[in-house]
Amino acid sequence: MDYKDIMNNVWSDVQDLMPEHVERLSWSREQVSDYQTKKLRALLKVAKENTKYYGEILSDVNVDTFELEDLGTLSPHDKIVHMDRWNDFSTTPELTYEIAEAHMEGIRSGNNENTFYKEKYLFVATGGSTGKRGLFVWDLEFIRQIICYTYRYIVNDEQRNGYDGPCRLATVEAPTLLHGSPYVFPSKFIPNMELLSLASTDPIPEVCAKLNEYRPTHLMAYASSVAELASAQIKGELNIKPKWVCTNSGPQDEDIRNRSLKAWGVKATNSWGCCEIGQMGIETQSSQAMVICEDGAIFEVVDKNNQPVSNVEDAAKVLATNLTNFAMPMIRYEVDDIIEIGPPLPEYPGYKTVTRILGKATFWFEYGAVRVHPTAFSNILEEEREVEEFQIVQTREGALIKLVCGGEPNISEMNDTILENLGKYGLTHAKIDFEIVDSLPHHPETGKIKRFIPL
C-alpha cells in the first residue's frame, strides 16, 4: 500500500474512534486523572522493557504502582539528549536513527514509494520555529489519536449545534511529507468529507484561486498562512466563507484573530502542539482558552531547575509526557514553550486550559545583563495592518527586522514604540534596522518561518 491507502485506513479508524473521543470531553477531573494513571503505567512498562534509555531511568521503579505525582522523581530530557541517544529511545530494534535518515533521504530523492516505513511507521522532522532539528517516530495508532484530539472539539460543537451541512476541509500545511502536519490536519475525521490540501510555500495567488474554486466550509492552516489568506480576502483577492477557522504550527496573535474576524466573521481558533508530543491543546469557537488534551499527554510547567511553578513569570519550560506514542516514548520531554495553565471550562470539566502562551524560552534576546522578550518587538509589528509577515534577527546593538508588507508600513512609529519597549527592559540607545523583503525563507521540511533569531 502507498501512504494514501494507509491514510484512508487511518481515517476509517478515526471515524470509528471519534464517538469515544467526543464522549471523553464530558469526563470529570477524576475520570481524566484515572485514565492518565492507567495510560502512564502502560507507557512506563513498555518504555522500561523495550528501550535502553528508560530501562536505565526506570530500573528501580515499580511501574505497576506508579502514580501521577511520582512523575517528578524521573529525570527529564531535551531534544539534544534525544538526538544524541536516538536509538536508545526506540522501542523497536528495527527502528534506528540510521534507518530513519536513510528512509527520509529516499523520500526526498523520490526513491521511496511509500513514506511509511514498513507500512506502519512514520518518521517526522521538526525544527521550523526554533531552527533546532529533531527526528521522531509515529506509529499508526499515534496518528489516529492525534487526529481525534485535533478534531473532536469541532465534531462535538457541531453535534450540539445541530449542524449537518457539507464539510469541505481545506488545509495549508508543510510542503513536504517529511513533516507531521500533512498526516494530521488534512484528514477525513467524519464520513462524507471532502479535502483540499495545499502547501504553505505555494504562492498566495495560486492558493487563493484553488480555494475560490473549492469553497471550503472549514479551514485549518499555519497561523502565518491564515494571516496571509485573511489579508487576501480583505483585499478582494479571495472569496470564501468558512464557518470554522483554526491555526496550528506557530504562534497566533491578536492581529491574526482580528484579520480572521474582519475577513470571514469567525474567530480563528488557536491550537498548540508539536511533533514530539502531538496535539497538546486546542481552542473552540465558544471557548476563551485552549483545552489541554490531558487524556493524551501530561504537562508540568517548571522553572529552569525543573521545579514546579505556580507563577507563570517563573516558568522556563514545559515537561511533557506523551501517553499515546509507544513506538518512541517521550516521558518528561522538555518543550520550551512558556504557558500559563488555567482551570477547566464548564463544557469540558475534566480538562485544564492554556490561558496564555508567552512564547518559547529559547527566543529571549540577551544583551549582556539585559534580557528582552521578543514580544517587545513583535507586539507592535502584529498591530501594524500593512505588515503581513516578519522576522526579527537580533544584532549586538538591537535588531534587524525583516518585513513582508501589503502596503506602506509606518516604520517611524514602529521604531519609536520598539525603542520605548526596550527602554522598559533597561536597554537604552538600541539601534533598530528595518528591511522590506518580498518573502521570508521557509524551513525546507516544515514550511515554517523562523520568527525570532537570537544571537
Image: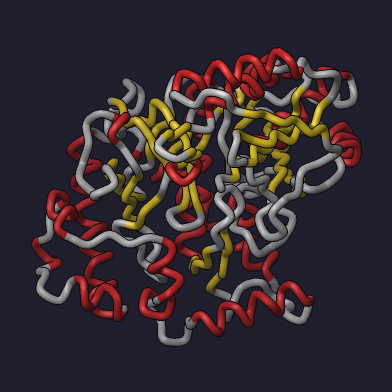
How many numbered marks does the figure carry?
0
The x, y position of residue 274, in whole percent, is 49, 50
Q: Nearer the viewer, residue 202 or 286?
A: 202
Q: Residue furthest bottom?
A: 94
The x, y position of residue 245, in whole percent, is 64, 29
Q: Nearer the viewer, residue 260 or 419?
A: 419
Asked if residue 36 is positioned above or below residue 110 in the image, the reply reads: above
Residue 210 seen from this side: yes
Asked if residue 285 is positioned above or below residue 120 in the image, the reply reads: above
Q: Image check: 283 left or right of 223?
A: left
Please identify the quarter of the rendering in which residue 47 is found.
bottom left
Residue 220 seen from this side: no
The x, y position of residue 381, in whole percent, is 66, 23
Q: Please report the residue visible at 86 percent of the width from the left and 20 percent of the height from the top.
A: 407
Image colouring: secondary structure
Q: Please report the residue visible at 63 percent of the width from the left and 35 percent of the height from the top.
A: 399
Q: Image check: 143 left or right of 301?
A: right
Asked if residue 443 is positioned above or below residue 163 in the image, the reply reads: below
Q: Nearer the viewer, residue 373 or 356?
A: 373
The x, y position of residue 243, in whole percent, is 67, 23
Q: Please report the residue visible at 28 percent of the width from the left and 28 percent of the height from the top.
A: 349
User: Quarter of the image containing the N terminus?
Assistant: bottom right
Q: Image check: 80 left or right of 219?
A: left
Q: Please report the residue visible at 66 percent of the width from the left and 72 percent of the height from the top.
A: 115
Q: Image check: 288 left or right of 32?
A: right
